[in-house]
Image (cartoon, coloured by chain):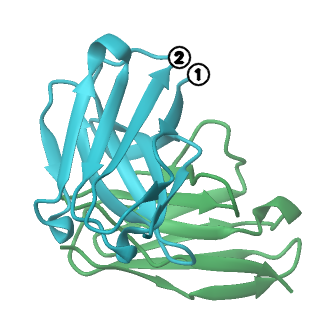
Chain colours: A green, B cyan
Amino acid sequence: DIQMTQSPSSLSASVGDRVTITCRASQSISNSLNWYQEKPGKAPKLLIYVASSLQSGVPSRFSGSGSGTDFTLTISSLQPEDFATYYCQQSYSTPYTFGQGTKLEIK
Amino acid sequence: QVQLQESGPGLVKPSGTLSLTCAVSGGSFSTSNWWSWVRQPPGKGLEWIGEIYHSGSTNNNPSLKSRVTMSVDKSKNQFSLKLSSVTAADTAVYYCARGYCSGTGCYLDYWGQGTLVTVSS
């Protein structure tokens, strides 16, 4: 199985901050990397697919980059509704695997 | 707008079989999508369980060994999950989701709201 490792596991930030979350794959996955946002009691929401494509309806302050083994999710200017947990997921090969999550908290 | 809704018992006894169904509405079921199951134990991260194509082809997570059975009922626009020999470790929120594959990759773009299944006697 391909292991996905996110860093940091948790992060405190303020409204307006620029935030970057990193995801590393245990082997090359080309650009087969997706990012999801999860809020308590809600289903995960797709933000970014194939590393850098913004899902329809997702604010442009979210962006993704990377290829191979190293990927990043960037939020350019944090908004109150962005405080949530973020997961990366590889879809290069089954079993599709998720990172352990990054919890973004208000400072 | 595609919508998915999970249904099934919220409590299953140890060694029993967990059975869930996901009803799909607002879109064509028999298109090039993989219909997926993902679970999340309380306080933990997401685990991909498996996926089924409208033709019935499946991909499963080997970590669940041969305990997983998935099926699709195109006439009802729904797909199902069975997980046998459950233990407390299978207690989780279970999500169904649509897996969409384009030429550049696959991703889960629509999700059900999730249903908590507790394994307990």
Quadrant assignment, res A61 = bottom right
The reply to whether the C-beta atoms of the residues labelled 2 and 1 are less than 8 Å apart is: yes
The quarter in which the N terminus of chain A is drawn is bottom left
Question: In whole angstroms, how far apart are the C-alphas of marks 2 and 1?
Answer: 5 Å
Q: Which residue is pictured at 54% across the width and 50% down the height?
A: B115
Subunit of label 1: B
The residue at which mark 2 appears reads as B26
From the viewer's perspective, tell me whether residue A61 is left or right of residue B36.
right
Q: Which mark is residue B1?
A: 1
The answer to whether residue A106 is visible is yes
Q: Which residue is pictured at 70% across the width and 64% down the height?
A: A40
Q: How far across and down, in percent of the image, does residue A23 sit? A: 44, 77
Q: Which residue is pictured at 28% across the width and 54% down the height?
A: B17
Dot 1, how many residues are within 10 Å of its Cα: few (below 14), some (14-19), or many (20+)? few
The residue type indicated by label 1 comes to Gln
The residue nearer to you, when weighing A45 against B121, is: B121
Pick whichever of labels 2 and 1 is earlier in the sequence: 1
The answer to whether residue A52 is visible is no
